[in-house]
Amino acid sequence: MLPTGVSSVYSVCSDAAGIAGNVLAFALFVSPIPTFKRILRNKSTEQFSGLPYIYSLLNCLVCLWYGMPFVSPGVIWVATVNTIGAIFQLVYVIIFIRYAEKVRKLKMSGLLISVFAVFVSIAYASIELFESHERQIFVGCLTIGSLISMFASPLFIIKLVIKSRSVEFMPFNLSLSTFLMSLSFFVYGMLKDDAFIYVPNGIGMVLGIVQLMLYTYYNSNSGEGSREPLLDSCA
């Protein structure tokens, strides 16, 4: 057991890392706003994909559940950041459904219902089938799986940058915010001694470093313009 003074320092540092992660995640959550302003202006989803927002919504809901006190006591900043993220993603999905063509509207509506059905199933199973410690492990494993699956997008972007030798599709501010957010929650997880937090965010941090290195290397050959990002990360 740590001395009171040391424990207090750990608590302050972990809270600082958690707050920093929340602030940086907010920057990621608002990054698709230009895309949706365009959708609202044109009253059409054009060629934009709504799937990243569906995936992000499910990811935020799973991570939100993991951060709840009756699942994982003491990691409330995970719950707060993913509550905000889930609200943003839900709003984006609703707007997308509102202005999508009929076929895509039905598909996205079905996926949205499926996301909530999966989340309710996870929540019900974790409460009814597991005790406190086992519940944390069960939801924690799902959280790691969900977060790692979200890294498919950065890997695709990294491959695209290398193939095209251009950072047009990898905005610097988005890459930097992703790296700093992952770093913040990696530190938060380490201070909380929670592998379900620091392992996936450690992977995200490494991918963020790779993106920043690629940006530095290819920036001289890249145009100044960039496309609106279609995918957000969650802690």
Image (cartoon, rainbow, N blue to C red):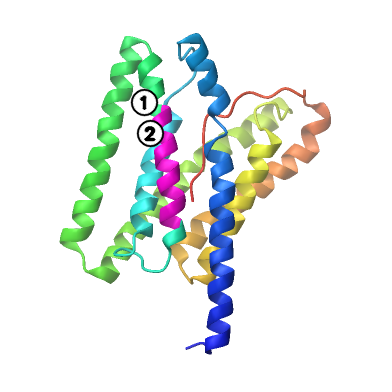
Can you tell which quarter of the image residue 72 is in?
Answer: bottom left
Magenta segment's dominant SS is: helix
Residue 75: image location, x then y, percent: 43, 64
- Please say whether residue 57 is visible from this viewpoint: yes
- To which residue does mark 2 refer? 90
Magenta highlight range: 78-92
Residue 154 lies, with reference to residue 78, above or below; the image says above
Kind of residue at badge 2? Leu
Q: Local crowd at mark 2 within 10 Å, few (<14), some, or many (≥20)?
A: some
Q: Residue furthest left?
A: 128
Q: Which mark is residue 210?
A: none
Instruction: Say if the magenta span includes residue 81.
Output: yes
Residue at figure coordinates x 77%, y 26% from the top left: 222
Residue 114: image location, x then y, percent: 26, 34
Q: Local crowd at mark 1 within 10 Å, few (<14), some, or many (≥20)?
A: some
Q: Residue furthest right?
A: 220
Residue at figure coordinates x 45%, y 31% from the top left: 52
Kind of residue at badge 1? Ile
Residue at figure coordinates x 45%, y 42% from the top left: 85
Q: Secondary structure at mark 2?
A: helix
- Depth check, front residue: 29 or 117: 29
- Label 2 near label 1: C-beta < 8 Å? yes
- To which residue does mark 1 refer? 94
- Depth check, front residue: 167 or 18: 18
- Please say whether residue 202 is visible from this viewpoint: no
Give the tally of numbered discs: 2
Residue at figure coordinates x 17%, y 61% from the top left: 129
Cα distance in 3D space between marks 1 and 2: 6 Å
